[in-house]
Image: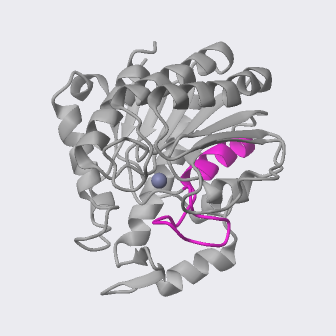
Amino acid sequence: MTTAFFSHDDCLKHNMGPEHPESPERIASILAHIADTELQQNLDWVRPEEITRDQLLMVHPESYLQQLDLMAPTRGRVFTDPDTSLMPDTLRAARLAAGGNVQAVDMVMSSQVTNAFVCARPPGHHAERTKSMGFCFYNNIALAALRALNFHQLERVAIIDFDVHQGNGTVDIVSGDERIMMCSSFQHPLYPHSHVHRQPDNIINAPIEANCSSAEYRKRVESAWLKKLQDFRPQLVLVSAGFDGHRLDPMAETNLETEDYRWLTEMIVNVAHDHANDRVISTLEGGYHLRALGESVVAHLEVLDAVY
Ligand SMILES: [Zn+2]
């Protein structure tokens, strides 16, 4: 049994400009770092297909999908918020990223692979049900969760979001759905400045102060999440894997090390081992320092690859 690794060249065609941190070079850096390791041979490389319209409708209403389709330009770019723009190749890349997440659920649920990492862009966790923002258009991890619940008829799915920014889009979509437990850690205060207080019981927040050390981070996350996850007994663990909490990352002020991502992944696979038959699907969110991103994803994948 192996780790499926989803990637597609067309996800690199979405390019919001030379100064934009959410760049195609992020994927290139991850692939270059993997090439130097045994992961290159060990991973099961999969090219995703585009998500279907019906599958997108699990999360996003038709009116929102139409709005994006109408905005997508045939040349140049159109901004949906000051940081996020649509180009001719954007929605295909977004459909491939979302499609990879749905296919990863299907492959893991049918025991073709033990776990999966979707190395695609644009990311998804800031995309709300009816609003694109923060470099995101379709909410990839929520689509994966709904695929597991609706199609595979699971009863309990956990979403772990360790991106340094709070996954407001995922919160918007899963709040109050008791089939889903969302555990997240994020620097606070920081973009997107929402959804931190007065959350429903299925949203477990671990806000982190700027300049937080590795040791403080680990303690905070373990005490906020672990017992809740064990009590919830997820049948599948989904991960919004953002690596922008790294100390080298320009987007935030937390001080995580590459080894903290290994530690986080070990905690996640342990929960999945206890309750979910080792089933984990992780999807790329943020991470903008190219070397730190490549090294951190390799650490994350090495833990996933060691599960069998
Ligand atoms: Zn982020």
Residue 189, horizontal then vertical, whole percent: 59, 56
Q: Which quadrant would residue 171 be assigned to in this image?
A: bottom right
Most foreground residue, 31 or 6: 31
Most foreground residue, 163 or 170: 163
Q: Which quadrant would residue 230 be assigned to in this image?
A: top right
Q: Is residue 260 above or below residue 211?
A: above
Q: Is residue 209 visible?
A: yes
Q: Is residue 34 above or below residue 125?
A: above
Q: Is residue 56 above or below residue 64?
A: above
Give the tally of numbered discs.
0
Indicate the colouring scheme.
one colour
Q: Is residue 113 visible?
A: no
The residue depicted at 32 percent of the width and 67 percent of the height is 14
Please state, as top left, top right, bottom left or bottom right, where the N terminus lies in the image: top left
The residue depicted at 62 percent of the width and 41 percent of the height is 184
The residue depicted at 46 percent of the width and 12 percent of the height is 308
Residue 223, horizontal then vertical, whole percent: 68, 25
Q: Is residue 130 magenta?
A: yes
Magenta highlight range: 125-151
The residue depicted at 49 percent of the width and 20 percent of the height is 266
Residue 212, horizontal then vertical, whole percent: 49, 38
Q: Is residue 8 above or below residue 93?
A: above
Residue 130, horizontal then vertical, whole percent: 66, 72
Q: Is residue 281 left or right of residue 117?
A: right
Q: Is residue 135 left or right of residue 176?
A: left
Q: Is residue 214 magenta?
A: no
Q: Is residue 92 left or right of residue 38?
A: right
